[in-house]
Image (cartoon, rainbow, N blue to C red):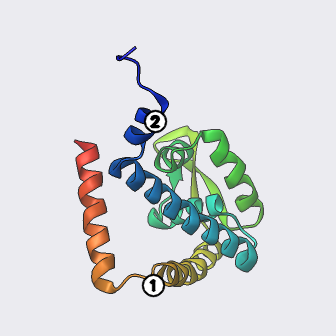
Amino acid sequence: MSGTPQPDDLMVKLDNRTLRLWLRLLGCTKLIENEIRTRLRETFDTTLPRFDVLAQLYRFPDGMRMGEISHRLMVTSGNITGIIDPLVAEGLVERVGDPQDRRVYVARLTDAGKAAFEEMALIHRGWVGDLLDGLTDTEQQQLYDLLTKLRDTLHE
């Protein structure tokens, strides 16, 4: 059966540059993400999803609807509610009525939430810098430019 790929042929096709690149990108992302998760847990007793929600709310001082947060973080509204509720209980986030639609609530950082996030963000930035320190400044810029080009190509 000459038309049916044989296992050795399939392995050769799978072992190509693009697949290796994809796996390398995925592997690096996971290594960095796992390290950040560990450091957030050990240093701030928080999780990466909580940090991500706080980061979104920090970018929008007037607050965000739950659906907006879930859309930006690409998770369900239920996931966001499960993160927001404890943040509200801890006094880091408050829920306020949306002036444009009284049926909807907007989540926004409290002053305590803003201060907590600013502290975390500053230290987080240092961690990311440490993790990427194996690349020179020039290499980091080249990698950034290439990944930007890839992202832009994927959006087309």
Q: Which class describes the residues within 10 Å of circle 1: few (<14), some (14-19), or many (20+)?
A: few
Q: Give amino acid for label 1.
A: Asp
Q: Position of residue 132 (x, y in %)?
A: 46, 79
Identify the residue under disc 2.
Answer: 8
**Image vertical order of residue 116 relative to residue 21, above or below:** below
The mark that comes first in sequence, 2 or 1, is 2
- Judging from the image, what secondary structure is the residue with disc 1 in? loop
- Judging from the image, what secondary structure is the residue with disc 2 in? helix
Residue for point 76% across, 72% down:
45
Q: Quadrant of the C terminus?
A: top left
Q: Position of residue 75 (x, y in %)?
A: 57, 43
Q: Quadrant of the N terminus?
A: top left
Camera-side mark, 2 or 1: 2
Q: Which class describes the residues within 10 Å of circle 2: few (<14), some (14-19), or many (20+)?
A: few
Nearer to the camera, 2 or 52: 2
Left or right of 17 on screen, residue 79: right
Nearer to the camera, 99 or 137: 137
Left or right of 122 on screen, residue 49: right
Mark carried by residue 133:
1
Left or right of 27 on screen, residue 137: left
**Image vertical order of residue 74 relative to residue 107, above or below:** above
Residue for point 52% across, 59% down:
27
Residue for point 73% across, 53% down:
85
